[in-house]
């Protein structure tokens, strides 16, 4: 019986699994059980920033596991504190709260926003079309795509989703009752689409005028992937709360909310919490990931190699104008929008031993480990050229 048959027999059917049986990963490669090597340009959905089995991450996990795997948040835990010190120092945000996942970071931020707004007569939360913030009810209340929401309502009150990157929609939506605006400056699941400078200028003006919290969802774009520590740093604005997850636990479940002192001060002991959030092993792995990223200059590397990736993809756009609509992205968060379904191209690349995925039906998404080199980009674009020519 194949793994797929065994899985289908017992799982609630929520995932479309790939027809691959993976044995192990090493660096930028995954190896299937039959010994085939795949170049992973997808990195576990932008999680594996350092690729697979990175010795520094493995060592950190081993060492922390021998000391203790879990204590509970009644205890002070040094790996939690070490990671918090690193994240606050390098992000410029003074305060942190740990969650277990991206969606929990979204929930926590929505609660901070509501609590912050409660003493100011503000309760509205504004979010944007095509965004993705997670699968819990709060996160779904801040999204619009039927694919994720249909049949699960009713949702939270006072949540308004408006058109992405449309300054006039934003002007109409923001009022004195607005507690927070939640934004992926560079949308991931939504198809690697980013906001314009003009939109950010309007956002800034409105925040100065009305006073609301700006929450940046950096769960996919954060920690160097786009060539800056956070995606929003491509713009001239400073959010109040920043959501992180995916790469910060080195592959272990970990989410975080970074906050200004003002936003952080609305929570007091007992108001918010989690059993597992800030798991010490995940935090130890996170310390290893961030130190490696900083010491090896991987943020600048993501900017440089990302530029090379985008140029290579743009050359394919020129070569295949009838197949490629647009290439866009920042650093190693790149998308190629096709003029048709992306899944056959993803499958054609898989046949050529390269793993990517397709988001928003037509957008090929490239979110590789930050350690990839030019040769990996070349292999990918050569295979893509063949796939597009077919
Ligand atoms: N926000 C963004 C931008 C994401 O890309 C994701 C996951 O893909 C999430 C939130 C939700 O994260 P999680 O799946 O860890 O709950």
Image (cartoon, rainbow, N blue to C red):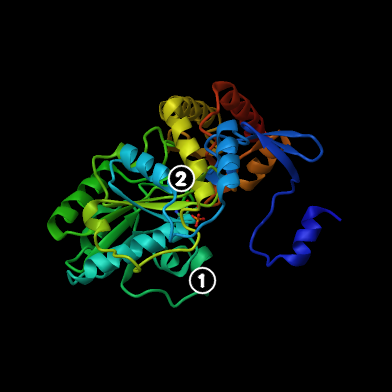
At horizontal 50% and vertical 59% (from top left) the residue drawn is 276
What residue does disc 1 label?
150
**The image quarter in which residue 298 lies:** top left
Q: Badge 2: few (under 14), some or many (20 or more) residues near its Cα, within 10 Å?
A: many
Q: Badge 1: few (under 14), some or many (20 or more) residues near its Cα, within 10 Å?
A: few
Question: Which residue is more in the foreground, 123 or 264?
Answer: 264
Q: Secondary structure at mark 1?
A: loop
Residue 318 showing in the rendered view: yes
At horizontal 59% and vertical 28% (from top left) the residue drawn is 381
Disc 1/disc 2 C-alpha distance (Å): 40 Å
Q: Secondary structure at mark 2?
A: helix
Q: Position of residue 179 (x, y in %)?
A: 24, 64
Question: Which residue is more in the foreground, 348 or 281?
Answer: 281
At horizontal 49% and vertical 68% (from top left) the residue drawn is 149
Q: Position of residue 210 (x, y in %)?
A: 15, 60
Q: Image height check: is 147 above or below 388? A: below
What residue does disc 2 label?
79
Q: Image height check: is 211 above or below 44? A: below
Q: Image height check: is 124 above or below 73? A: below
Question: Which residue is more in the foreground, 147 or 95?
Answer: 95
Q: Position of residue 227 (x, y in %)?
A: 40, 32
Q: Image height check: is 183 above or below 228? A: below
Q: Is mark 2 within 8 Å of ligand 1?
A: no
At horizontal 41% and vertical 52% (from top left) the residue drawn is 256
- Residue 5 vs residue 390: left or right? right
Q: Quadrant of the N terminus?
A: bottom right
Q: Which mark is residue 208?
A: none
Q: Position of residue 337 (x, y in %)?
A: 51, 42
Q: Earlier in the sequence, mark 1 or mark 2?
A: 2
């Amino acid at each position: 019986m194949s793994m797929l048959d065994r899985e289908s027999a017992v799982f609630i059917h929520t995932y479309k699994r790939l027809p691959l049986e993976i044995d192990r990963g090493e660096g930028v490669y995954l190896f299937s059980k039959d010994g085939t090597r795949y170049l992973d340009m997808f990195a576990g959905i932008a999680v594996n920033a350092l690729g697979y089995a990175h010795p520094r991450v493995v060592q950190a996990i081993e060492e922390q596991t021998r000391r203790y795997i879990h204590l509970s948040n009644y205890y002070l835990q040094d790996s939690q504190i070490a990671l918090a010190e690193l994240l606050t120092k390098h992000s410029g945000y003074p305060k942190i709260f740990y969650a277990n996942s991206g969606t929990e970071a979204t929930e926590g931020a929505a609660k901070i926003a509501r609590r912050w707004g409660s003493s100011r007569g503000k309760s509205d939360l504004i979010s944007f079309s095509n965004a993705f913030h997670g699968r819990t009810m709060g996160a779904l209340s801040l999204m619009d795509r039927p694919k994720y929401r249909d049949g699960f309502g009713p949702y939270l009150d006072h949540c308004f989703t408006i058109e992405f990157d449309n300054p006039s929609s934003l002007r109409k939506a923001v009022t004195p009752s607005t507690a927070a605006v939640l934004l992926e400056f560079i949308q991931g699941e939504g198809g690697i689409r980013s906001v314009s400078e003009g939109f950010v200028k309007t956002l800034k003006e409105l925040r100065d005028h009305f006073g609301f919290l700006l929450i940046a969802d950096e769960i996919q774009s954060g920690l160097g992937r786009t060539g800056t520590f956070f995606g929003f740093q491509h713009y001239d604005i400073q959010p109040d709360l920043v959501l992180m997850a995916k790469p910060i636990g080195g592959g272990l479940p970990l989410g975080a909310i970074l906050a200004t002192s003002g936003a952080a001060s609305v929570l007091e002991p007992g108001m918010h919490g989690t059993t597992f959030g800030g798991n010490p092993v995940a935090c130890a792995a996170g310390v290893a990931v961030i130190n490696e990223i900083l010491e090896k200059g991987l943020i600048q590397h993501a900017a440089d190699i990302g530029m090379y990736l985008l140029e290579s993809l743009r050359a394919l756009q020129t070569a295949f104008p009838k197949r490629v609509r647009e290439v866009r992205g920042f650093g190693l968060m790149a998308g190629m929008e096709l003029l048709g379904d992306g899944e056959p191209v993803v499958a054609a690349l898989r046949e050529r031993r390269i793993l990517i995925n397709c988001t928003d039906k037509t957008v090929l998404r490239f979110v590789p480990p930050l350690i990839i080199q030019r040769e990996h980009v070349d292999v990918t674009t050569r295979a893509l050229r063949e796939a597009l020519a077919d």
